[in-house]
Image (tube, grey):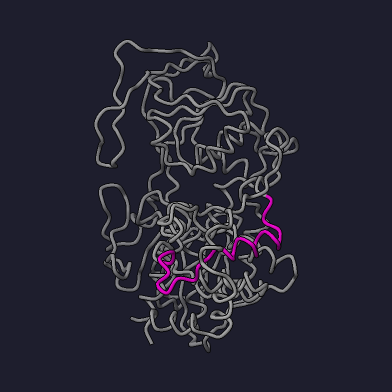
Amino acid sequence: MDNKEYLKEERNEPWREELRKSMKNKDRVAIPRVKMPELDATYRSRSYDEVNLGLSLEQAVQEAKRCLDCPDPSCMSGCPVGVNIPKFVKNIERNEILEAAKALKETSALPAVCGRVCPQEKQCESQCIHLKMKSESVAIGHLERFAADYEREKGSISVPQLAASNGIKIAVAGSGPAGLSFAGDMAKYGYDVTVFEALHEIGGVLKYGIPEFRLPNSIVDVEINILQKMGVKFITNCIVGKTISYEDLHEQGFKGIFVATGAGLPNFMNIPGENLSGVLSSNEYLTRINLMGANREDTETPVFFGKKVAIIGGGNTAMDSVRTARRLGADKAMIVYRRSEEEMPARLEEVKHAKEEGIIFLTLHNPIEYIGDEKGRIKQMVLQKMELGEPDASGRRRPVEIPGAIETLDVDLVIVAIGVSPNPLIPSTFSGLNVSKWGTIIVNQDSLQTDLSDVYAGGDIVRGGATVILAMGDGRKAAAAMHKK
């Protein structure tokens, strides 16, 4: 049975038919979209408590009623991991929340994570039938978070069904979203999976890159614990390509390797003054705070907090950095972005939250020099004012300098968040890999297999910088291809 027939068969189950008949579509469309409860902006701007508070049961059930249970659910076409969206949403509508959580786990290894950090507005929700009817999309992301949280809070966490063990050993390099998603699917297929993580904590970018006010570490740990219950083994403080080589993995009996080491090499602008003390990458800043506790008074690895802090960039990492700086006491926390707000790649929700928390947006500005004091510490940044020209290859209008329009501002900390490049270790140590000029591993796009027949790769090491859910989709695709092989 193909997937379309399977979805049709499920949709025709008596309980789904009964739900559809219980309310007319026009009445479902008339229900206003739920609003996510949030912490007060003034309070949260100085707190690490999670900003979004989650839906109540009543809110979730009401929102689930908005889903029309379409015969051909277009929302699913926007989900990189293929979540059966109508199935889990309709289970919420009939108050079978634990069944909704099980439905999510059929395809997603990290539903509580995805419900918090995935850009649903650009993916599943952007394909919702409601939009064609001039109505707001169903809040699929909010409902996904609700179902996963409900299961955890009730202490009834389910473990996906596993195939019988086949005894074949598979290695995963990296415990970020691509690696975890791959590991979960391979465990379901019956493989003996071991994940090697270079850091002392499991979770990759989910732990070191995303602040707890957006994604609490405890949520990530619950998802990882489920994978452990599925038989996935984790080895920390082990760098594939250095601590353990490609040849070592073969000697230990691993028959397949999935490379998911991400893109942890920060990009800089190479402008004067970038080597001054007080100019650092978002990678270092967020890792030292999120993973090493640099925000605590008793930390052994402190970071300078700053009172006048500028973050260079307009993506989600820039938003995470500037909102972190605000929470660490910055009186003036600024986003400096060379395009307009409309071109910002950050999620609309993150921009909204940042503005509510007092973040200053200096759009159409680009740093051209940093000025230091006599001790070599940054004290000012020189900004070039910009205007928008014709669209470039990205489809966004190209920023163009306005001649002579220069501004100098006082700063005591600058965080550069203009993107990352792939981790170069495995590409340089696995002999035979085909690597692009950008340092990404070149793979077969259908299978994610590399030029080494037993090595597959996905996530940021293949894409450059991308989203959690796209990395997870790569993990699922690679697992299916390796299993089929």
Q: Is residue 74 magenta?
A: yes
Q: Residue 27: x, y in percent?
A: 56, 63
Q: Residue 162: x, y in percent?
A: 55, 83
| Placement of 261 over or under 48, stated as above or below | below
| Placement of 62 over or under 35, stated as above or below | below
| Placement of 110 over or under 335, stated as above or below | below
Camera-side residue of 62 and 151: 62
Q: 472 left or right of 109?
A: left
Q: 182 left or right of 307?
A: left
Residue drawn where x is 40% and y is 30% of the image: 340
Residue drawn where x is 64% and y is 28% of the image: 305
Q: Residue 464: x, y in percent?
A: 36, 50
Q: Quadrant of the N terminus?
A: bottom left
Q: Quadrant of the C terminus?
A: bottom left
Q: Residue 355: x, y in percent?
A: 57, 32
Q: 351 left or right of 302?
A: left
Quadrant assignment, res 103: bottom right
Q: Which residues are magenta?
A: 53-76
Quadrant assignment, res 428: bottom left
Camera-side residue of 427 and 57: 57
Residue drawn where x is 29% and y is 33% of the image: 397
User: Looking at the image, how many numbered discs can be counted on the residues?
Assistant: 0
Q: Residue 245, can we see it?
A: no
Camera-side residue of 332 and 42: 42
Q: Residue 259, can we see it?
A: yes
Residue drawn where x is 41% and y is 59% of the image: 127
